[in-house]
Amino acid sequence: MSAFEITALIVSGVFVGFINTLAGGGTIISLSLFMFMGIPADVANGTNRIAVILQNFTSAANFKRKKLLDTRKALWLALPTTIGSMLGAQLSVEIDEATFRKAIAVVMLLMVFFIAVKPGKWLKGQEALQQKKISPMLMLLFFFIGVYGGFVQVGVGYFLLGGIVLGAGYDLVRANAIKVAVVLVYTIFALLVFVINGKVNWQVGLVHSIGNVIGAYLASRYAVNWGANFVRWFIIVIIFITAADLFGIIDIRSWFV
């Protein structure tokens, strides 16, 4: 790799790690840059998982240190998500994703409606719901979120946050802590599927991870200071940008390459 490529991978990684920790959708930047560098789409999809694992390990450790991570609840939610992610990762090697991406964009925009109309559930949390055991329906929901996360990863954070806030009762800051822990666990297993299928470029993935770790550290360190309302509006803005890219209205790739 050239010095320019290394710099681009690290700098873009900072943005990706920051965005993915607070919301989601940063993976679009990673995939776009990888493909611009000549990496096939399926290999780019697998390579991206290296940075995802390292950035979420950094974030989860930081949230745990700040006593914001409910580890027990995170592990329970990670179980069905992991099973789904392995299925989704295998499907991603075989299925075209164009139509799938547009359907996901529609769901993302619907999520903006719920975040904007009922902010109380996202900002304050629901203590009674947090104390309840995870229901079979929530486990099923996280299985399907895992299928999507294993398939393409882009924007999976939005769906995880939605499930954790509305299904488990956490505010956005604590939900983010659980989200990164769930993503960390399931991505390890999804990466194994890509490795087995020979769809990972380790050199590019590890260099990109340097920036991801920095961005994830900054986001997880200061998220609690910024508060749930800041995270809420940050998510809304990023969802609109991500959905516009998925619909083909804008091209995020052109912003970074």
Image (spheres, rainbow, N blue to C red):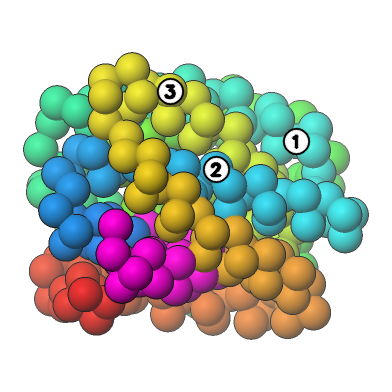
Would residue 139 appear left or right of 101 to someone viewing this image? right
Question: Does residue 55 show up?
Answer: yes
Q: Quadrant of residue 53?
A: top right
| Magenta-colored segment: predominant secondary structure | helix
Residues tagged 1 and 3 counted as in contact (Cβ below 8 A): no
Question: Does residue 166 show up?
Answer: no
Q: Element type at marker 1?
A: helix
Which residue corresponds to the image point at 74% horizontal and 75% vertical from the top-left?
A: 222
Which residue corresponds to the image point at 18% horizontal and 48% vertical from the top-left?
A: 39
Binning the other alpha carbons within 10 Å of mark 2 as few (below 14), some (14 to 19) or many (20 upward) gives: many
Inter-mark Cα distance, 3 to 2: 12 Å
Q: Which residues are magenta?
A: 1-27
The x, y position of residue 235, in whole percent, is 50, 72
Q: Residue tagged by mark 2?
A: 53
Q: Residue tagged by mark 1?
A: 73
Q: Element type at marker 2?
A: helix
Which residue corresponds to the image point at 38% horizontal and 45% vertical from the top-left?
A: 203
Let me know if residue 17 is in the magenta part.
yes
Q: Element type at marker 3?
A: helix
Which residue corresponds to the image point at 39% horizontal and 71% vertical from the top-left?
A: 7
Binning the other alpha carbons within 10 Å of mark 1 as few (below 14), some (14 to 19) or many (20 upward) gives: some
Looking at the image, is 254 positioned above or below residue 91? Answer: below
Q: Earlier in the sequence, mark 3 or mark 2?
A: 2
In the foreground, 19 or 209: 209
Q: Earlier in the sequence, mark 1 or mark 3?
A: 1
Would residue 218 appear left or right of 16 to someone viewing this image? right
The x, y position of residue 145, in whole percent, is 43, 38
In the foreground, 20 or 172: 20
Point out which mark residue 192 bears. 3
Would residue 171 appear left or right of 15 to someone viewing this image? right
